[in-house]
Amino acid sequence: METAYTYKDTLAASQKVNWRIEDIIGGEKRLDFTKPFLPETLARTGVISCLNAEERRRLNQIRAHEYLYVFGLVEEFILPFVMDHASHQFHGEDERIQALLQFAGEEAKHIHLFKRFREDFQEGFGTDCAVIGPADGIAASVLAHDPLSVALVILHIEWMTQAHYLDSVKDDQALCSQFKSLLRHHWMEEAQHAKLDTLIVEALAESLNEKEVERAVKGYLEIGMLLDCGLMQQVLFDIKALEESLGRVFTGKEKQEIRSAQEQAVRWTFLGSGMTHPRFLATIEQLKAGARATIEQVAPAFC
């Protein structure tokens, strides 16, 4: 299994785009709550007939809060995973070590960025939005799996991030410009992380036999189901936050309509869009014959 990516090239690219948190958030750089934050392809609020335009926008913003919170949550397991992998590379080539440490440093920065965003969001939105957790507990559950399983989940997330920004966010002029800026800066660094994680998957798979790779792919799907359970709970939290924000109690029928639309939206956002990414599937295909078909059979449930 080989790719065209190199540690040297990804390190050089990362060093060129490196940015500081204080340059993109805080001061006059504020969220605009008169506009949606997430593109409709991810938010999927437009199909909810029991909400008016203002209510859909409020739900869109709650979903955006969830979106960056979940990214911060997954980076809570990405960071220790990358650090652990880097610790086994200290006698390898210098550029590999530097690239992995840069990877870890950027993930730590992203965790801090998303915490800063949540502070700004809560101040401007005016309603507390509950979130799943604790993050360290979820991270521990994920990291208990085979390292290759974890690496595949991370690769899924990295390519998913690319698709979200390039396909949905970048050219959407209706979105809050500050939220778009946060996603753009996140994407700039994650573009290199996707390449580095492809190299990590390659390194981990190199010494495994076919059965071990098969178990790792199964572990990837198990982690996906673990995350799905958390995401379904998050949908309920989001609906409750919307009720509190609007000062409105939804009927059972209304709540079911919102829940159905948002469960599909959240599953697509965090699971389906990663599982169906062509580059993720190309890596899966190289790991083991038939592994891609397994993922493609499962993916429709999350699309």
Image (cartoon, rainbow, N blue to C red):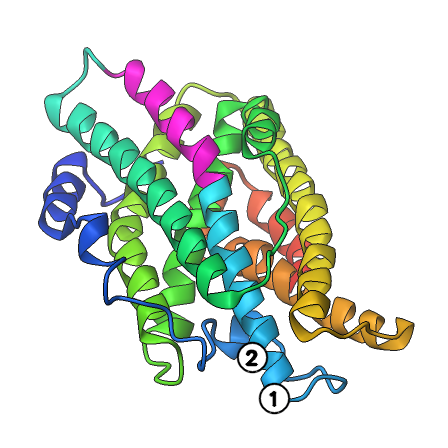
Residue at position x 74%, y 57% in the image: 236
Q: Is residue 103 above or below residue 230?
A: above
Viewer-nearest residue: 2 or 28 = 28
Picture quadrant where residue 278 is located = bottom left
The answer to whether residue 276 is seen in the rendering is no
In the image, which residues are magenta? 74-89
> Which residue position holds label 2?
57
Q: Which quarter of the figure is the N terminus placed in?
A: top left
Apparent side of residue 296 relative to residue 301 in the rendered image (left or right): left
Viewer-nearest residue: 199 or 175 = 175
| 287 part of magenta stretch | no
Looking at numbered disc 2 in the image, what kind of residue is underneath it? Arg
The answer to whether residue 108 is seen in the rendering is yes
| 81 part of magenta stretch | yes
Residue at position x 43%, y 43% in the image: 155
Viewer-nearest residue: 235 or 197 = 235
In this view, which residue lies farthest toward the right?
Answer: 252
Picture quadrant where residue 109 is located = top left
Label at residue 268 = none
Q: Residues within 10 Å of mark 2 (few under 14, many from 20)?
A: many
Residue contact at pointers 2 and 1, CB within 8 angstroms: yes
Question: How far from the left and from the top, in percent, is residue 165?
Answer: 37, 66
Label at residue 53 = 1
Looking at numbered disc 1 in the image, what kind of residue is underneath it? Ala
Apparent side of residue 254 relative to residue 86 in the rendered image (left or right): right
